[in-house]
Amino acid sequence: MNIKLVQMAKRLFEATTLGSISLSNHIVMAPMTRSRAIGNIPNQLMADYYAQRAGAGLLITEGTSPSVNGTGYARIPGIYSRQQVEGWKLVTKAVHEKDGKIFVQLMHTGRISHPLNMSEGSEILAPSAVPAAGEMYTDASGMQPFPEPRAMSVTDIKQAVQEFVTASKNAVEAGFDGVELHSANGYLIEQFLAPNTNLRIDEYGGSNENRSRFLIEVAKAVVDAIGKEKTGVRLSPYGVASDIVPYTEDQAAYMAEKLNDTGLVYIHLADHSSMGAPKVKPSVVEKIRKAFKGSIILSGGYDAGRAELDIENGRAQLIAFGRPFIANPDLVIKLKTGAELSQPDFSTFYTPGEKGYTDYAATAVESVA
């Protein structure tokens, strides 16, 4: 790590605000699927994991399903049942006891799902009956091909909007400081946005405006339900997860304008180029920033020096770090001091249990080198 750049980084570690919420620094822990929610119910192990990382100004949880129909992966949490709400209370209490702030990311997986990962009576739904390419992991039978989803009716769409609203209210009850609507990475909301997964010819398909309609309706409904200060959105322009064809810059700008009208507190822009996706062009970031007057969170391959520069030059209000937080629960201190980062064990990213999850030691000492 470049010690000189770390020593220059000052604003990154200063206290700040996100809307009306006070944060201890400008660092966000990005949402990362970790698959430790046995039976899709949050637990004490997860509470320990998030509390260990509460030094971040803001924690954003792993993708959490608002619906039985949206729980597509093995062992991901939900927030649609009473047991799940009670489980999440363990997490928010543990984080708040460490003076941390935490948003839950609401992620409906849509077509990125398999019946073996879902509850009895649930159904795989998507904007159109377009199966995803490839396979996904199931605990019961290993890797399995993606099934063809059922195309959602307008009634299904209205119900899904309400599921996001109910999940958001559950999040507030569980003690979260807010919610992030996952509109990236190839999941349900982005399936509506993308031209290859949304083949509809009704008011939810065809034009940029129509393909953006579901996202805007969800955002407006959640803002109305829990407040604009508690609502954020994650987008991934140029993201190609799950064979998504990226939407245009014009559509991104349109979405940002409409999201700005809702008053929500932030847009979180994910750049996955460090993992092989096309790089998010500066032009699309500028169009979004011009249209959206709330806070911008940027993520994607940051170190402390680059993060400081983007805070200083006003490109972002907050910077999100993902995988470095896995093996470095004390990442904020390590970034501040220039300490060497521990490397994660990739084989335990999605396995059950504490190994590779809560057993990484905090080793940094908070003193500037």
Image (cartoon, helix red, strand yellow):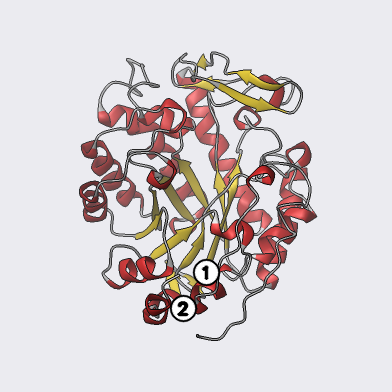
Q: Amino acid at mark 2?
A: Ala
Q: Position of residue 174 (x, y in %)?
A: 68, 55
Q: Which residue is mark 2?
A: 15
Image height of 98 relative to 323, above or below? below
Q: Quadrant of residue 263?
A: bottom left
Residue drawn where x is 45% and y is 39% of the image: 218
Q: Which residue is mark 1?
A: 57
Specify whether 351 is left or right of 207.
right
Image height of 7 relative to 186, above or below? below
In this rendered view, identify the residue nearer to me: 13 or 169. Answer: 13
Q: Position of residue 168 (x, y in %)?
A: 57, 47
Q: Residues within 10 Å of mark 2 (few under 14, many from 20)?
A: few
Residue drawn where x is 61% and y is 56% of the image: 326
Q: Quadrant of residue 290?
A: bottom left
Task: Give the structural element (helix, strand or loop) at label 1.
Answer: loop
In this rendered view, identify the residue nearer to me: 139 or 44. Answer: 139
Specify whether 25 is left or right of 309.
right
Q: Position of residue 305 (x, y in %)?
A: 38, 70
